[in-house]
Image: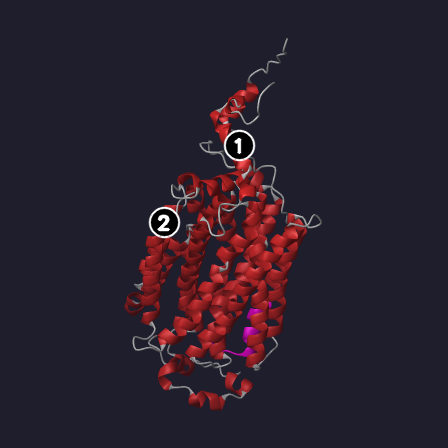
Amino acid sequence: MNGNVNNRSYYPNARYATVFQEENIEAKKKQGWFGTRHFVTFMLFLGMANAYIMRTNMSVAIVAMVNHTAIENDNHDHAVSVDDECNVESVNQTIHHEELNGEFVWKTDVQGYILSSFFYGYVATQIPFGILAKRYGNIYFLGIGMLINSVFGLLVPVAANMGIWWLITVRFIQGLGEGPIVPCTHSLLAKWIPPNERSRMGAFVYAGAQFGTVISMPLSGLLSECRFGWPSIFYVFGTVGTIWCIFFLIFIHEDPQSDTKINTEERLYIQKQLGSKIGLPIPAVPWMSIAKSMPFYAILLAHMGHNYGYETLMTELPTYMKQIHHFSIKDNGILSSLPYLAMWLFSIFISHVADFMLTKPFFTHTLVRKIINGIGQYGPAVALLAVAYTGCDKWLTVAVLTVGVGLNGGIYSGFKVNHLDISPQYAGILMSFTNCMANLAGLLAPIYAGHVVVGTPSIAKWRIVFITASCVYAGCCSFYVIFGSGERQSWDQPAEDPAEKKENDEPQMITTRA
């Protein structure tokens, strides 16, 4: 063969005309420090923050909505008194009567059903939307779903005044709308983010959950004490969520190929890193292979354990701070958000550590995921066990929870991005399954806590709640450490290019020059 290899005539198909141009993309580094993929990541971060704001604002609002004095007067179980345990009678005298008395007489078990109603809807749409989004695209499922969530959030105050079942129904519909957020986000990350950037980008996006919680809890506490009271919580956040949905639907595209405004070199860079090819058929999902995959079950168990422990804290922490340590609603929101602020900051830090470890030859993907995830789940397990015995020392309790939940940020560079490692092609579908089952486990957390603490709350009752969550965290993480993997699985094979298949099937002729 003669001639320059850069000559286009060398290639049997015009598709290969850009191959050498692609090979030089990384060296040129012209895609910039902030490209379209970074903008997509930022919008997904805001979407995740919005999702968790809509999920957690009820946890603080319900403290202001409930008539605590009426409930205490209605309780006939006086065997243990929180006031006697922690000697806070003087504190109770300084709490304003109007702060104690909301509009609704809901005992802790009823509050548990209200807090969990969101998750019944949330889990119902995980798997079907994850499968449909794989075939029809993620943008509209995610954007319109979150729009439903935000609009119905505006209806929460009206529903609460109409009756408890109306409130549960509205929260259920909000959950239905939020269902696509995680599987669709995961699928978009798989299409937009190169493997060497996944720990950082994935952790940044999912850290939006903590950012949303950090915003939601203290701001909800402040809004509950403003002129318009607790309804303003839902009016403000519902409006903000609606605005985000409109911007997302206008500016975000399914993948680099469908975005006409992306820099050409950045598009080629992403395609080359992902091995993307345009126009390939969508392969059938290897259901049986997934069902037999131990690395998949390792992620599933880790996800379930995390959600149970996380939802225990997220939905019950404001109530615990109110019942045991008697913080005001405003202080409650601020202090309850501190652990999630620590988690947000730590998740960003540890994601850079994870990507740095992956650059070293002695750290495999499997080892990095297990180490970082171990920090992310054993850490809060130890913290919850410690909090079960901190008793009436409220500042020690806050400090331990802040450190423990902060370490929980490791899960975003652990099992959360592990779907992308073992199956970049089916990451969205895998996430829809694990997130569905994880939230089924998570919705049990407020129900279980509500039944344990029902009646007169006490440290002993809350100790049971925290120890249970600690054991679930540790047990599920141990399963992940044993059976998890960071390697792409054999059943995750990319679709075969028909043109390449045809070329490979044709008999090759060898010619010689005279």
- Observer-nearest of 172 and 279: 279
Residue 391, image x and y in percent? 58, 80
Q: Amino acid at mark 1?
A: Val
| Residue farthest along the right direction in this orientation | 362
Residue 251: image tag = 2
Residue at screen point 38% across, 86% down? 96
Residue at screen point 57% across, 77% down? 397
Residue 327 is one of the magenta-drawn residues: no
N-term-proximal mark, 2 vs 1: 1
Residue 206, image x and y in percent? 50, 57
Q: Amino acid at mark 2?
A: Phe
Residue 19: image tag = 1
The answer to whether 305 appears left or right of 221 in the picture is: right
Rate crowding at label 2 as few (under 14), some (14 to 19) or many (20 or more) other CA atoms within 10 Å: few
- Observer-nearest of 321 and 374: 374
Residue 248, image x and y in percent? 37, 52
Q: What secondary structure is found at the residue carrying circle 1?
A: helix
Q: Quadrant of the C terminus?
A: top right
Rate crowding at label 1 as few (under 14), some (14 to 19) or many (20 or more) other CA atoms within 10 Å: few
Query: Would residue 456 be visible to someone looking at this image?
Result: no
